[in-house]
Image (cartoon, rainbow, N blue to C red):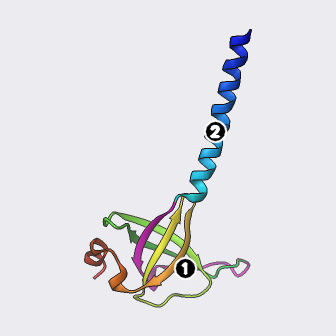
Amino acid sequence: MKGKAIIACLAAILIVGGVVGGLYHMENYDKLYYTKVDNAQVSELPPNKDMKYQYRLDSYDEKGKKKNLKFETSKELREGAYLMLEVKSMGVHKWEEVQYDDLPSAVQEILK
């Protein structure tokens, strides 16, 4: 009887720990990707949304690994601008314009 109670307690601790760890990972996981704005890849969103535009752009991590990412903006971005995208587990969390010299060298080669 005592053994079953201990096993039940350990199982509960593992489950709670897994849930807490998963939530922490979802909230704090981020990876940086880099892209170049191509306004041919933008679409307008319905007028009832907070954001007005949605971009779908090929983006690259610091090693040059490609990933197509989508994100929304309130304004149309400057054609040819370089962006750094902060990606969390749920998608692009935020973006900011950067200079070409701030891009990782592997990304510079791709986005010349």
* Residue position marked by numbered label 1 in the rendering: 43
Any magenta on residue 40?
yes
Q: Distance between the residues labelled 1 and 2?
A: 42 Å
Give the position of the N terminus as an image quadrant.
top right
* Residue position marked by numbered label 2 in the rendering: 17
Q: Is mark 2 on a helix, strand or loop?
A: helix
Of 47 and 108, nearer the camera is 108
Image position, residue 57 (x, y; %): 44, 73
Query: Height in image: 106 above or below 23?
Result: below
- Taking the spot 59% from the left edge, 54% from the top edge, the residue there is 26
Query: Height in image: 110 above or below 10?
Result: below
Image position, residue 112 (x, y; %): 27, 82
The kind of residue tagged 1 is: Ser
Q: What element carries label 1?
A: strand
Quadrant of the rendered image containing residue 60:
bottom left
Image position, residue 107 (x, y; %): 31, 74
Highlighted range, magenta: 30-48
Image position, residue 74 (x, y; %): 62, 84
Query: Height in image: 40 above or below 11?
Result: below
